[in-house]
């Protein structure tokens, strides 16, 4: 009954991966840790919480977001804590760490699920009930008959080969 909102904040930053025997970022490695948690980064990663937030309505997540790291040294440290080598950091994220050296302001944002809100307002059980052109369970789209078959000539022009599993 009614509209019950809940803000969820201060998610754990890391989760321990038993398979790889190291810490992984729970959301992503660009989230700013809470200021008071930064001293725990190296010695007690389980005590580090992130500046993340979710808005939940009647048990359904409506939006999710975070404040991002804007300090190049902290971003570098986060990548190192997640097990990336200096070479990997430079190859994958060097542009970002370098950009932060030019004093990026604090920044963040969130993604809002308007389709989920429409589902709740309409009392629908599924997102497919409120989307104009929903995909069915096998990811096909009945209105446009997608995905479509691509002829061999087009594939050849684009230098694409198909491999069929047996």
Image: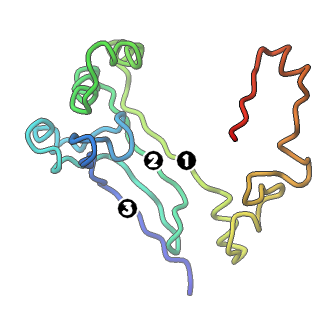
Work out how far the residue at label 1 is from the one at label 2, CA to CA, in angstroms: 6 Å
Q: Earlier in the sequence, mark 3 or mark 2?
A: 3
The one of 61 and 5 positioned closer to us in this rendering: 61
**Residue drawn at 21 percent across, 42 percent down:** 21
* Residue 77 position (above or below residue 58): above
Work out how far the residue at label 3 is from the one at label 2, CA to CA, in angstroms: 11 Å
Tag 3 secondary structure? strand
* Residue 35 position (above or below residue 126): above
Outermost residue, left side: 43
The residue labelled by disc 2 is: 65
The one of 28 and 153 positioned closer to us in this rendering: 153
**Residue drawn at 15 percent across, 50 percent down:** 47
Residue 146, quarter of picture:
top right
Classify residue 144 as left or right of residue 131: right
**Residue drawn at 83 percent across, 21 percent down:** 155
The residue labelled by disc 3 is: 8
Q: What mark, if any, has residue 111 been given in the picture?
A: 1
Assess whether mark 2 and mark 1 are in contact (beta carbons under 8 angstroms).
yes
The one of 83 and 128 positioned closer to us in this rendering: 83
Q: How many C-alpha atoms fall within 10 Å of the one at disc 2: few (<14), some, or many (≥20)?
A: some
């Amino acid at each position: 009954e009614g509209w019950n909102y809940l803000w969820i904040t201060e998610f754990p930053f890391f989760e321990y991966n038993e398979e790889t025997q190291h810490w992984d970022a729970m959301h992503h490695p660009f989230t700013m840790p809470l200021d008071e948690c930064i001293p725990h980064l190296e010695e007690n990663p389980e005590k580090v919480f992130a500046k993340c937030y979710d808005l939940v309505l009647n048990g359904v997540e409506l939006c999710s977001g975070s404040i991002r790291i804007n300090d190049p040294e902290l971003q570098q440290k986060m990548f190192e804590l997640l097990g990336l080598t200096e070479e990997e950091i430079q190859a994958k994220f060097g542009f970002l760490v370098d950009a932060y050296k030019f004093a990026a302001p604090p920044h963040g944002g969130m993604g809002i699920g308007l389709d989920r809100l429409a589902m709740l307002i309409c009392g629908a059980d599924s997102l497919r009930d409120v989307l104009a052109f929903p995909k069915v369970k096998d990811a096909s789209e009945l209105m446009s008959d997608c995905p479509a078959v691509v002829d061999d000539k087009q594939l050849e022009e684009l230098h694409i080969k198909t491999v069929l599993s047996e």
